[in-house]
Image (spheres, grey):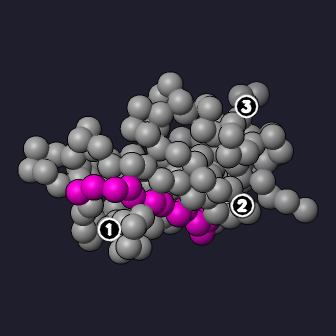
Amino acid sequence: MSILRPGIDVALLNTRGSEYLPGYLGIEILELAERTLSSRMPVKKLHVAPNEFLHAASVVALADTTCGYATVAHLPEGAESFTTIELKSNHLGTVREGAIACVATAQHLGRSTQVWDATVRDEAIGRTIALFRCTQMILWPKG
């Protein structure tokens, strides 16, 4: 039996985010499978800080979006939504051009929380630029 929520696929996730921050930043969901989701984001000037390095917030936005969309696709039956209750990132490098890619992997898929790890890499050479972990609280209908 699949743990993926029926009706959630790559096309839906990309469409859903198109008019929100993920769409504005150019985040593209690439692949969804059980316990994992991958994405990418082309590096544009809007992702860069005034020091000409990739802004940490851009990296976090990619990782958090990837983990968040993975959570949506793995919500337990009957759950309404989720919210991020904790996140942490370690930044190990930067990218000045090209794109960055992210893979989120489930560490815990419970009824009240999910924990996801994500690795963000330089898409061209595969060098890790950030490690990310978040905890998501599962939201259930009231009553």
Image: magenta residue range:
96-107
Left or right: 19 in relation to 61: right
List the residue tagged with mark 1.
Answer: 129
- Under mark 2, the amino acid is Ala
In reply to whether residue 134 is colored magenta, the answer given is: no
Q: Which residue is at the front of the view, 4 or 38?
A: 38
Q: Residue at x 68, y 64 (%)?
A: 35
Secondary structure at badge 2 equals: strand
Tag 1's secondary structure?
Answer: strand
What crowding class fits label 3: few (fewer than 14 Cα within 10 Å), some (14-19), or many (20 or more)?
A: few
Q: Are marks 1 and 3 in contact (CB under 8 Å)?
A: no
Point 39% across, 58% down: residue: 100
Mark 2 or mark 3, earlier in chain: 2
Kind of residue at badge 1: Ile
Look at discs 2 and 3 and give the one toward the viewer: 2
Residue indicated by mark 2: 33
- Lower position in the chain sequence, tag 1 or tag 2: 2
For this orientation, the residue located farthest to the left is 51
Label 1, label 3: how many angstroms apart (C-alpha)? 38 Å
Q: Which amino acid type is marked by label 3?
A: Pro
Residue lying farthest right?
Answer: 1
Marking on residue 141: 3
- Is 98 one of the magenta-colored residues? yes
